[in-house]
Amino acid sequence: MNRHPTPSFSNIDRTELEPNEIFEIGIKQWKIDSFYVAYSGGKDSGIALDLCAKNFPKQFKGVVFVNTGIATTQTIEFVKKFCNDRNYPLFILRPEEVIRKKNDGLIYSYENLVLKWGFPTVQGHNVTMRWLKYFPMRQFLEDRIKAGEKPALISGIRKKESARRFRNKNSSATAINRDGKMIFVKPLYFKDNNWVMKYFIENDIKRSPVYETLHISGDCLCGAFAQRDEAKLLQMFHPEVFEKIKQIEKKLKEKNHKYAKKYGTWGNSNIQSIEEIEAQSTLEEFVCNECFFDNKKEKTLDNKRFDDELKDIEEKLNHLSSKS
């Protein structure tokens, strides 16, 4: 007799399910046979990947990483090494490879998006994400369906992880959702920061080294949520991205259309260009808008939780060593 029956799908929006229960619903009720983990090099997607690979090896078919064209070199290399060390199949997707239905000669890329519409803003973030990430992933899943699979993308999105996402009315408010032919499974959907930090530490989950400089994974530096002073950090730690943004700003200025005038600078700033920021010798009053959480208070609490967990683990290890 099954002592742990699969929860009813009718309760998925009302019951805070465990990650494995959400996976099981995907398999048994959505008839999914292939899991592809959308991995950014970040903490949450890393945990989702770890859970999937360990607990559902039969369905786990690999890692999907979208090279948005505006990622740090460190992030891309980290993802490659991370998957290679664990023998995870890695599928690197690019927006430039998306076959457009309109035969207008336009190629999806970050640069083309900016030159056509200006630099992304908070209001335009959804459009930016569809262009750079959603369309490549949709094409990938369509190819898998044509190959006879019933695939789904595994995402690290959580309901409680971000006040910005929670306020977004367009955010899919369920642990599993379908968008056309795309199915998204979010095993961490109901988990809070404490659970995530505990799992992250106890299971030795790795994350992109870019977290040490930008507090984000660095897979998409489109600038939609950035503040202008963040560009100085790019100049200091990730000059290849800084130089790319600088060149795109120059090209956009030459376009001289209405979007170029209104959204002509990276990072939601109509005051300073990248060249003006480059001329600054210091970085003052830097505020990271794209950190784990949405404000300084939550970031401080998160760091304290992280330190407390490490201290607790060290004490336990010392206690065990003293007994041996």
Image: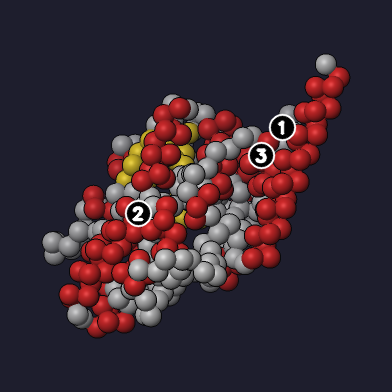
Quick check: 314 left or right of 33?
right
SS at mark 2?
Answer: helix
Instruction: Tell which tag, 2 or 1, sits nearer the viewer.
Output: 2
Residue topped by disc 3: 201
Residue topped by disc 1: 2
Q: Is residue 114 visible?
A: no
* Residue 282 picture location, percent across and down: 46, 66
Say which amino acid is labelled 3.
Ile
* Residue 246 picture location, percent across and down: 28, 64
Mark 1 packing: few (<14 Cα in 10 Å), some, or many (20+)?
A: few
In the image, farthest residue toward the front: 281
Q: Determine which of the numbered discs, if any, sits on residue 239 in the image.
A: 2
* Residue 9 picture location, percent across and down: 61, 51
Instruction: Tell which tag, 3 or 1, sits nearer the viewer.
Output: 3
How is this picture coloured?
secondary structure
Quick check: 311 left or right of 73?
right
Give the mark nearer the N terminus: 3 vs 1.
1
- Give the CA distance from mark 3 to mark 2: 31 Å
